[in-house]
């Protein structure tokens, strides 16, 4: 199964200013998160951010924060516990009641439901804490979860890799930034091919 941009949402988890200096390969991880955000926006894939206890850890670094349409401030390690699920799968708007001149209820058509984007592309820090717990909760909520390994990390490589093992065993797909980009493109004939390629080569 390949990623389809029209079915995806991107979540960038906790790339926070006071955390990132302690993160293994933090600079590379930030660069890949920014690439993901830039590529997602070109494909009109919604991009969300999260920040764990921003009063203590600071906001996400500016180059990541600017990629996100909205950023969720949270205290739980899983962003789902603080409302991420409602952002990813908003409730359908309530139907409006009719009046004496409207069609009978059995002839009224229900309003069309907004298209569901049930595939969540997830990246962030720390992999073994906030990213892992968010991913497991999203799987429980029956989202398809794809974790971008080269845009994820922890303070230690061992913790990061243990999280990847657990995520794969739980049913998350593991991939890289370039895999996301080329699966969204599908073909070298895509009108954004050169633009995306340039972002990947930065």
Image: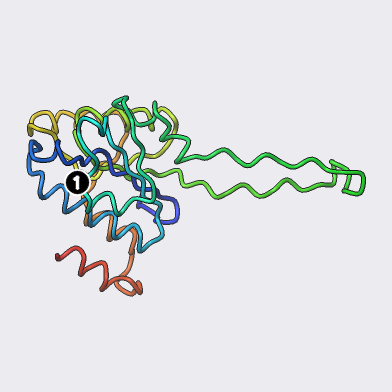
- Residue 107 as seen in the image, left or right of residue 65: right
Looking at the picture, tell me which residue is in the foreground, 193 or 63: 63
In which image quadrant can residue 145 be found? top left
- Residue 66 as seen in the image, left or right of residue 99: left
The residue identified by callout 1 is 151
- Residue 151 as seen in the image, left or right of residue 78: left
Secondary structure type for disc 1: helix
- Number of marks in the rendered image: 1
Looking at the picture, tell me which residue is in the foreground, 193 or 26: 26
In which image quadrant can residue 76 be found? top left
Q: How is the image coloured?
A: rainbow
Does residue 131 appear in this view?
A: no
- Residue 4 as seen in the image, left or right of residue 128: right
Q: Position of residue 47 (x, y in %)?
A: 36, 50
Reply above or below: 40 against 23.
below
Q: Position of residue 1 (x, y in %)?
A: 36, 49
**Residue drawn where x is 10% and y is 44% of the image:** 26
**Residue drawn where x is 24% and y is 38% of the image:** 14
């Amino acid at each position: 199964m390949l990623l389809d941009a029209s079915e995806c949402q991107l979540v960038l988890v906790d790339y926070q200013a006071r955390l990132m200096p302690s993160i293994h390969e933090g600079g590379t991880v930030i660069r890949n998160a920014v690439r993901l955000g830039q590529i997602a926006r070109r494909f009109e894939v919604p991009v969300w951010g999260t920040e764990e206890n921003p009063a203590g850890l600071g906001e996400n670094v500016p180059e990541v924060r600017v990629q996100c349409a909205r950023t969720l401030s949270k205290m739980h390690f899983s962003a789902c516990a603080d409302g991420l699920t409602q952002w990813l799968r908003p409730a359908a708007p309530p139907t409006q009641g009719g009046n004496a001149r409207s069609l009978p209820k059995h002839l009224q058509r229900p309003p069309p439901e907004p298209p569901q984007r049930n595939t969540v592309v997830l990246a962030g820090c720390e992999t073994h804490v906030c990213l892992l717990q968010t991913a497991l909760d999203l799987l429980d909520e029956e989202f398809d979860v794809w974790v971008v390994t080269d845009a994820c990390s922890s303070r230690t490589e061992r913790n990061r890799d243990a999280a990847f093992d657990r995520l794969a065993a739980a049913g998350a797909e593991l991939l890289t930034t370039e895999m996301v980009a080329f699966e969204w493109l599908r073909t070298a004939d895509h009108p954004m091919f050169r633009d995306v390629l340039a972002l990947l080569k930065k």
